[in-house]
Structure formats: C-alpha cells, structure tokens
Image: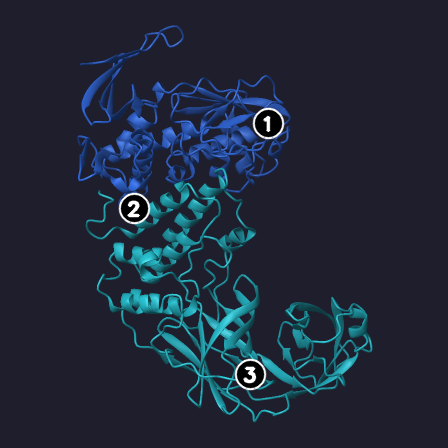
Chain colours: A cyan, B blue
Amino acid sequence: MSVTPSAFIDPELYLRLEGERTLLAAERTQPNGVLGAIGSALVAVGILPLGVASVIADDYALASELRPGGHPGFPFRGLRQASLPAVTAPMPPVVASCERVDPHTDGNIPYAVLDDSSTELAVTYDGSQDWQVVAQRFPNPAGFPQSLQMTDDTGQSLPAHFSGGGGGNGGWAGRFETQAPLSQHTRWLELGGMRLNLTRTSPPPVRVEQLDATSPAADFLRHRAASDDHVPPPDADPVVAALLATGALGVDDPVLVELGHFAGSAQFHPAISLPFSGLGRGPIGTVMLGAATPLLEGNAAVVYALTSAPDGFRVDTFEVGGGSSGHFGLQDVDPTPAFAWRARDDRGGSYRGRWQGWSGALHGRRGDVHFTPPLDPDARSLLLTPTARISRAVIEITLPKWSTEQ
Amino acid sequence: MSLGLLPPATALIGCHAERHRLRWESGRLQALDHDDVDGELALSALGGEPTPCAQILANWRKAQDDLRVFVLASRGAADPLTPPAPEQFPPGGMTGPGNFGSLLAAGAPQPAGLFAYAPLRPPAGFSSFAYATSGGGSVGSVEPAPDPLFALLQLPGGLPDRLVATVATTWAQRLADGAAPQSATAALTVALVSRIRLALQGWLGENAATMDVVMLAPGSVPTIERAAGVVRVELPFSWLADVWVPGLTHVLGRFTLASRASEGSIELDTVGTGLDHRPVTIALGDEPAGGSDVLRPEP
C-alpha cells in the first residue's frame, strides 16, 4: 500500500499520518485541535466512523502526553470519554419579565427563568464598585455578592448563587440561580428580600427550514466558515487538504472559490449571506423569548431573552449537543455542527452572532450570543436563525416599540 | 525475527513494600519474585486486588498485539518519551489501577538506536533514579493515566521497547500468515512508515517531504531509489521486526533494507547514502556470556 496520494488516500490512513506529523513535529509544544478538526470533517462527510476517528485522536493526544513538552490531558477528556446520555431536544423554558422595583437606575433584573431544575434571575449592574453600597439595594443582602436568598410565593426559599462576569467599564452581568427549582407558577420572586412581580409572555413560534444541500463536504465547509471565526484560507486549511486527499471534495468544487473569497471574514453561508444592515445605535431593552428549537443534526438551542443595547444585542442562550470541538484546545472528534447564529429583521437588515462569555457543560454551553450590528430601532420583527449544516431553526420574534429614552 | 536475539531486560518495581523483579527474555515477561502469578490473577478475578507485578503481567499480555502500542511508543532515538518522575511512584506498592508503585531500572545493556531512554548510570540503590533523553529534551513528570498502556510504556529497564518488539513481531507473523484483518492495515502502515521516515531523516538528513515510503506485501523484496529528488523506499512490514526492533537500522553508517537470521549469523542487505547495495554479515558468538559478535561487511 502506498501512502503517496497518487489516488485518493484512505481516510483512516490520512488521519493517522496527520497524527504522526503533528506528534513528531519539532514545534510540538501544545496539544492542538488539528487532528480533531480533520477527524470531525472526515466523520461529518461520512467517510470515517466516529469511533475510529475518536480513538485515533485520543491515542495521539495520549502519545503527546508521553513525550517531553507534552501536556497532561485536561479533565474534560476523561469526562468526554465517559458514557454520556444521548442528547434530547430541550423543552421550552418558562421565562417571565420582572416588574422593575429597584428605584435605582444603575441595576436591573429584567427576567426570570423558571426551569424544572432551577430558578434564576438575570441581573445587570453598572454602578458603584463598592460591594457594600451595592448590597444596600437588597433588604436582606446576606451572602452577597456570592449568593442571595431567593423566595417564591409559596414561601419556599433557596440560596441562589451568582454566575457571570464584569464588563470592561466596571459593570457586570450574570444571573442568580438556585440549585433546585422554586415554584414554576409563582407570581413573584424575592431576591435578597427584593420583591419582583413576574409577567409571563407567550413564547415566539419556532419552525425548521431545510437548506439546499450540495455535497457533504461543501455543506460542511460552508457551515464551518459561517460558524467559526478562525478558519484559514483554503490553501492553508488542513481540513480542506484532508477532504481533497481523501476524495471527499473535488479540486474543482466551487466551494473552494467561495471559501477563498470569504476566508477570514467568516460571513459566508448561502442561506445567510444577506447584506448587513445597521448603522447607528441600537435601542435599549429586553424581549422575553422562552423558546427551544428541535434537534437539528444533533444540536438544539434554548433562547431565554434578547437584550438590545446601543452597540448590538445579545441572546441569553443554552446550546445543547456537540460542536464543542477545539473549544478547549483538545483533539476532540465531534462532527455535530455547532450553530451558526444569524438573524434578519423585517427591514432587510441581517445580523451575525458570536458566542461570548459562556460556561460549558458536558452537553452544551450557556451564555450570551452577541449579535452585531446594533438592532434597527424601527424593525418590528426579527427572525433568529440558528443554522446547522443543511437545516436551520427560525424563531419569529416580535419586537416592541422601543422607548426612545436612552 | 526471533525475539531471542534481543538481550533480556529486567525492571525492579515496588510490590507490596518489596522490590520485585520483572524480567523479559525471549519474548516472555515473568515476575521472578512471584511463584504463581496466574493463581494471583485468578483470585483477583474473584474480587481480590492483584499485586502490582500480577497487574503488570496481565496488562502486558493484553497489550502483546495492541496496535495502539505503535502510536504511543517511541519511534526511535529521535522520539524520546518522558521518563516517569520518581516521586510519582512512592515506595510501597501500587496506588491504584495502572500505577506500578516505585520503578527502578536494572536493565541489561541496551542496543543503541531503538531505545528512547536509558539510565544515565546503573542504579546504585533503590533511591537513585535518573534518565537521559536522547533528544536533549527536558526531564519532566507525566500525570498518571488510567490507560494501562500508558503505564506499561513508562516501565523502566527497557521493557517498553520489548513490548514494541513483541507487538511488531506478532503482527509481522500475522501478515505473513495472512491472518491480519483489513481493519489493521492503516495502523500497520503508519507504524512502519513513520519509523522508516524517522530513521531515514536522521541518516540522509532529508525531510519527510522528499521521501515516499511504501508498505509492501509480506515477502516482497525491499527497494530504495532516488528519482526526481525523492527517495522512494518500499519495504514490507516485517522490516520493523527484522531490522528496526533489533537495532539494525543503521550498521556501519549504512541503512539496512532487510535482515535474515540464520544459524550463527545475521545477513543484512544494506545501502550507503549513495543508495549502493552491499551485504553485511554479523557473525554471532556461540556463547552469549563470553562469545563475541563479529561484523563482516562483504565486498
């Protein structure tokens, strides 16, 4: 058997040879995601079994650990190798807006998520950096800022722990979350003794659209370019090289020209290559969502609320499924497509979303998808479209008439 | 190749507060300080905790045809492994599955070329433990992992290389017998190709891009040629077992394409850097303890 690609090379052989190249490279000092990325592509286009690719990637990661300069595996690898339950479609969450009771203007608790496993309140704050001062906002600030007591209208009370982070200007945003659910039917919640009246809204409708499929390799590359900001140009892309060498992609496939044009901009996808809108400042406010997509090619998302700001808008999101390849710099083989996040409004504007400030779990990640450019204040509806490889969900959001006070 | 051509290797490991010897010889690993390892393993199958020596033997037996060994193990002197940190193996025995207690090298002299690391000096006592890395790499610690192969490949005394030798010989024989499944082809090909490339790189000073390595069917005649600036090498998998494993890759500054062991000698087909062929015969002494081996290049 020749390892010279005089014809197409066997996918397993290619992945192993790439493993040898990375393992024996003189500059090997860090585990990298190249093998995982190639393995994911070969699995995604259907020419290599997931089990084979995973074993190869894991073995080369272990081989790296055995060598000088190698790094012990992250605990995530062991967790990933554990037997995980299958991903199931999430249920739409109950999201309620909170009546503003805080007389101060430097903080906000815009909404609550009443889940069947926890209860949480979203918070933002942009005022004093003195915790003692901030604590005075709450009648019962015991535990603040790490936690506050959360209580429902049945009298049940649980500690709610803060998770979140600070912004560049000293403000911070996050959520206080209990580790067990309070009543999902409660009319109000108290956080640190501060009462918040809840108003439930109807969730936006969600539908699924199929995209025009071309070839598995072209679909894979298009989606990857749309969902990953760091895809190299095709002539320097090890994934493209692997797909060409194994015959999964033809050298004359038009996707290569398209990718070359869009390399680095990461704006490409046939279904979402709409012109970008948006100049000026976006409105300020929050729209309750409380919607969940069905499983799309192994991935699904829950969206809780949309918060618009002058420089863009963010959607509080839990994305469940795979698509975490490379997030920790590992060689994970994961062919499940993480969503490319896009939106378009009723005035022809389109928006691109990127994950920021998320926290990971075995099955997914929770945090904010930030969209730019700023939301058009005159738009009255928005289609939020988490997009997989050959299908996408469409979440139809009705936008309010925004207040002009900013 | 007969594994009997390789010199024996011995490692001392901590086993229940004692120092026990593991000895590899002629393809077999034995726990010299245990009377009935199989009996111990049978008892452990019923719920008992195996001794470190018994656990290593059990893992070794499972690994004798494990293709993953080729991925994890050293590809040669240019690919050294990090030796285990001594503090990782406190005296007194096994701390968990896959850990071997304290490890000390007491190996026989090791042939150059194959072995990724060797003791800087014969251990003077149980407390000294030093390694040199042939690539000049730093000595560091490696976190223990539950993978049994990981721990086997950190055994001292040359045992990891004996494990590679065993696996290579096993698969060379299976290929010769037509008993290797198709699913093993990619792993076997890469095991051979990677080691040949590394050996040729060091010898010719060329990079992988100027080499084309082909795995031939068992029994095929190996070839090497240079055309259009590319060195093309065609070898069967048995080259690993016959040439690479016994450290015959480079002899007298020449690259060995094939070897054939016969009564009292090993005949090598070698090429020089100009790719000129020349046979070399190694005459083996009759008595391993006192006899001497003679290299006899033939005109």
Q: Residue at x 51, y 56 (%)?
A: A328
- Residue type, numbered disc 3: Leu
Q: Which residue is mark 3?
A: A289
Q: Quickly name the residue at label 2.
A: B183
- Find the distance from the CA under tag 3 to the CA under tag 1: 62 Å
The image shows residue A352, relative to residue B153, as above or below, that is: below
Q: Which residue has dot 1 on it? A: B15
Q: Residues within 10 Å of mark 1 (few under 14, many from 20)?
A: many
Q: Amino acid at mark 1?
A: Cys
Label 3's element? strand
- Whether B260 is drawn above or below B235: the answer is above
**In the image shown, does A381 or B207 lie closer to the viewer?**
B207
CB contact under 8 Å: marks 3 and 2? no
Q: Residue B135, percent across and down? A: 45, 31
User: Are the residues under marks 3 and 2 on the same chain?
Assistant: no
Quarter of the figure with the N terminus of chain B: top left
Q: Looking at the image, which residue sits at the far front?
A: A280
Q: Chain of mark 1?
A: B
- B163 left or right of B94 in image: left
User: For the residue labelled by badge 2, is the local secondary structure a helix, a strand or a loop?
Assistant: helix
- What amino acid is at disc 2? Ser
Viewed as shown, does residue B223 lie left or right of A199?
left
Instruction: From the viewer's side, name the closer residue of A77 and A359.
Output: A359
Chain for disc number 2? B
Q: Residues within 10 Å of mark 3 (few under 14, many from 20)?
A: many
